[in-house]
Amino acid sequence: MSEDTKKTTHFGFETVPEDEKAERVQGVFTNVASRYDLMNDVMSAGIHRVWKDAMMDWLAPRKGQQLLDVAGGTGDIAFRFLKRAGQARATVVDLTESMLNEGRKRAEAAKMSDQLDWLVGDAMALPFADNSFDTYTISFGIRNVTKPEIALQEAYRVLKPGGRIMVLEFSQVPNPMLRQIYDLYSFNIIPRMGKVIANDADSYRYLIESIRKFPDQDKFLQMFNDTGFENTKYRNLTMGVAALHSGWKL
């Protein structure tokens, strides 16, 4: 394919070739891995924990279930799932080895390693057989995937009939005044926090820009429907700063 016809996508507000995005995203998370959890706490004032607990409340993990947590990074969602489910198993897939390494350390400290598998992998090409998992989650990760629609297709493929997908992602604040305040905070404060805490303002600037490029709640719900998921719904969190999307493979 010539340079003139090469397909492009967005990397934050920058236009890049599609085949370069995954590597650039991997670079972002390699840079911030050691301070990723700390930055989540600081830039959200801990609210991300409330959102993840709300995700588990709606998901209602059960004993014996097998979870696939994609873009699972340091394991936040997997740990919550296992604590709720009791005897269950979680597989965490992430594009970035250094993020998984942080998760492995946490699992060893929490004595949960025997319930967890960690695997470097791509959300658009999952290395699992069809109908393998009861539950699929992805938290603050699908907006970084080059083609989210393919990630959803892969989620549908690997879920068992009767399986459930749940996505937690930053979304669009519908109120114009609140959105303006949120934008001022996001674009002016968060990159500065990233510079001070993680010594990386650029990665956090990208992460903010990627939120603004992601489809809003209704458009993303339509992507669920187009994939074939049923009983699809979403719930706004903190006035739409984040949203939970849920669907079933029936």
Image (cartoon, rainbow, N blue to C red):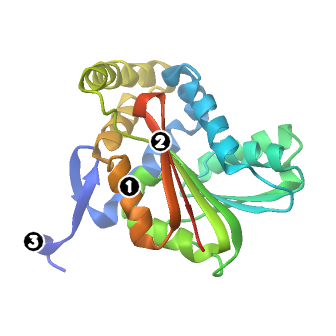
**In the image as oriented, which residue stretches furthest toward the left?**
4
Q: Which element carries disc 2, helix, strand or loop?
A: strand
The amino acid on which the numbered mark 3 sits, given as a three-letter code, is Asp
For the N terminus, the quadrant is: bottom left
- At x 75% / y 44%, what residue is drawn? 79
Choose the circle earlier in sequence order: 1 or 2: 1
Mark 1, Cα crowd under 10 Å, few <14 / some 14-19 / many 20+, is some
Q: Is residue 199 visible?
A: yes
Reading the image, the residue beneath label 3 is 4
Q: Residue beneath label 1, please?
A: 220
The x and y percentages for residue 161 are 66, 76
Residue drawn at point x = 76 percent, y = 52 percent: 61
Amino acid marked by disc 1: Phe
Front tag of 2 and 3: 2
CA distance for labels 1 and 2: 10 Å
Q: In the displayed structure, does residue 198 sit left or right of residue 79?
A: left
Residue plotted at (79% across, 62% down): 65
Label 1, secondary structure: give it: helix
